[in-house]
């Protein structure tokens, strides 16, 4: 029995080697570009959602808002499905969107906006050196 092979891109029947998946390089490139295009669009969508959520928290901090309710966040268009990290502790859940986050107890609909400062590798190294110097230790390389 012979299987009729068809191109994964255009669907035409393929003549030639049995392991061929495309009729030619054009179809091969077209096929791969289409999938990477979809993948990129999906990543752009997620990144935009994260940036938007972070921006909402950033703006609230700028307005010196610390405690916000679920409905206040909903009104801004905050999308609860998108966050970068979640830390669950006994008393509280912390969800971060990059450097800003929300802390909540789980019982109430009140949230506290928290922020985290990231250290650059250089800053981290300098702090380590200063700490070692103060402690009278050999300076780490
Ligand atoms: Zn083809």
Image: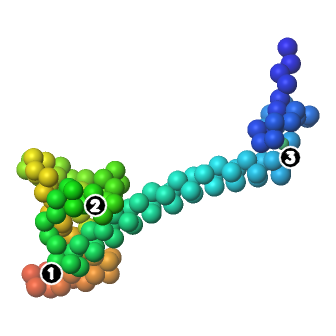
| 42 lies above or below 48 | above
Ligand 1, image quadrant it occupies: top right
- Quarter of the view holding residue 49: bottom left
Instruction: Count all numbered tags in the image, as a single digit.
Output: 3
Q: Residue at x 56, y 56 (%)?
A: 41
**Which x, y percent locates residue 125?**
27, 79
Q: CA distance from mark 1 to mark 3?
A: 62 Å
Residue 131's disc number? 1
Q: What is the distance, in whole Å, between disc 2 and disc 3 at their CAs?
A: 52 Å
Say which label, 1 or 2, has the lower sequence index.
2
Q: Do the residues bearing badges 2 and 3 touch, measured as CB atoms within 8 Å?
A: no
Q: Residues within 10 Å of mark 3 (few under 14, many from 20)?
A: few
- At mark 3, the secondary structure is loop
Residue located beneath label 2 in the image? 75
Q: Nearer the viewer, mark 2 or mark 3?
A: 2
134 or 31: which is nearer to us? 31
The residue lying toward the viewer, choosing from 129 and 114, is 114
Q: Quarter of the image for the N terminus: give it.
A: top right
Residue of label 3: 24
Secondary structure state at the residue bearing disc 1: helix
Label 3 lies in ligand 1 vicinity (Cβ under 8 Å) = yes
Q: Nearer the viewer, mark 1 or mark 2?
A: 2
């Amino acid at each position: 029995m012979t299987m009729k092979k068809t191109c994964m891109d255009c669907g035409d029947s393929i003549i030639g080697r049995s392991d061929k998946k495309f009729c030619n390089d054009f179809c091969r490139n077209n096929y791969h570009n289409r999938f990477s295009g979809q993948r990129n669009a999906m990543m752009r969508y997620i990144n935009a959602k994260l940036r938007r959520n972070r921006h909402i928290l950033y703006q609230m901090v700028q307005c010196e808002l610390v405690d916000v309710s679920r409905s206040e966040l909903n009104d801004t268009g905050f999308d609860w499905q998108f966050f970068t990290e979640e830390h669950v502790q006994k008393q509280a859940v912390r969800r971060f969107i990059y450097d800003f986050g929300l802390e909540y107890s789980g019982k109430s609909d009140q949230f506290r906006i928290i922020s985290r400062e990231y250290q650059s590798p250089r800053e981290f190294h300098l702090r380590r050196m200063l700490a070692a110097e103060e402690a009278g230790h050999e300076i780490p390389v």
